[in-house]
Image (spheres, rainbow, N blue to C red):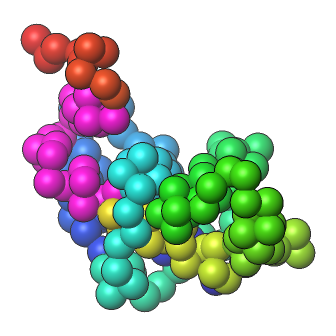
Amino acid sequence: MAFKLPKDTRKYFDLIDRRTDGGVKFKTLFDKYYLCLMAGLYKGNIGVVEKIEKDRFIEYYPDLYEGVNELIMGLLIDAEMERRDIQRQDKRRIENLMLEIIDHNSVTKLSETGMELLNRYAVSGMELIRDNIPKTSELETFLIHYYNLLKPEEDILILQ
């Protein structure tokens, strides 16, 4: 299995992609996936498989993301422990979860189950983004809204 985008991702970010004023754009499609994934892991919910694009868009981490696979793996395990109500003291259940999610022979170091979960967390992140951040053509504006969405209230940035 590989990285697959949530179905709404391309449409949601199309204004940024079509930007022609020389402003900042995403460098890769994986950038959008990563933002959706981080929001989904933050939210702690998994989306439904039907909201994932059928075709994979990449099978490995892009060079720009080299080294983040362990971080993502750890965040995925942590989110799944929370979602499945696995206590930190329950070593046996944690070990079983890790064996279910990790595959050291895979390019991504995740099993098929791990990749499906990752893609489903990206779906819930896309839903969170779509429902809380208005579409914009400016990546800078989007990122301020994204930061505010994931930060505690006392750290909110004000758009001027």
- Is 138 in the magenta? yes
Left or right: 93 as drawn, with respect to 106: left
The structure residue drawn at horizontal position 47% and vertical position 85%, both measured from the top left corner, is 55
The structure residue drawn at horizontal position 68% and vertical position 51%, both measured from the top left corner, is 88
- Is 79 in the magenta? no
Left or right: 31 as drawn, with respect to 134: right
Position of residue 11 measured from the top left corner of the image (x, y, whole percent) = 21, 64
Left or right: 110 as drawn, with respect to 105: left
8 in relation to 154, above or below: below
The structure residue drawn at horizontal position 77% and vertical position 74%, both measured from the top left corner, is 96
- Where, by quadrant of the figure, is residue 10 drawn? bottom left
Task: Answer whether residue 12 is visible to the viewer in this image.
Answer: yes
Left or right: 30 as drawn, with respect to 78: left
Position of residue 87 measured from the top left corner of the image (x, y, whole percent) = 62, 55
Camera-nearest residue between 6 and 27? 6
Camera-nearest residue between 28 and 113? 113
Position of residue 128 measured from the top left corner of the image (x, y, whole percent) = 25, 54
Residues in magenta? 125-150
Magenta stretch, main secondary structure class = helix
- Where, by quadrant of the figure, is residue 147 drawn? top left
71 in relation to 73, above or below: above
* Quarter of the rendering occupied by the N terminus: bottom right
In this view, the residue farthest toward the front is 89
The structure residue drawn at horizontal position 30% and vertical position 15%, both measured from the top left corner, is 155
* Quarter of the rendering occupied by the C terminus: top left
Camera-nearest residue between 48 and 137? 48
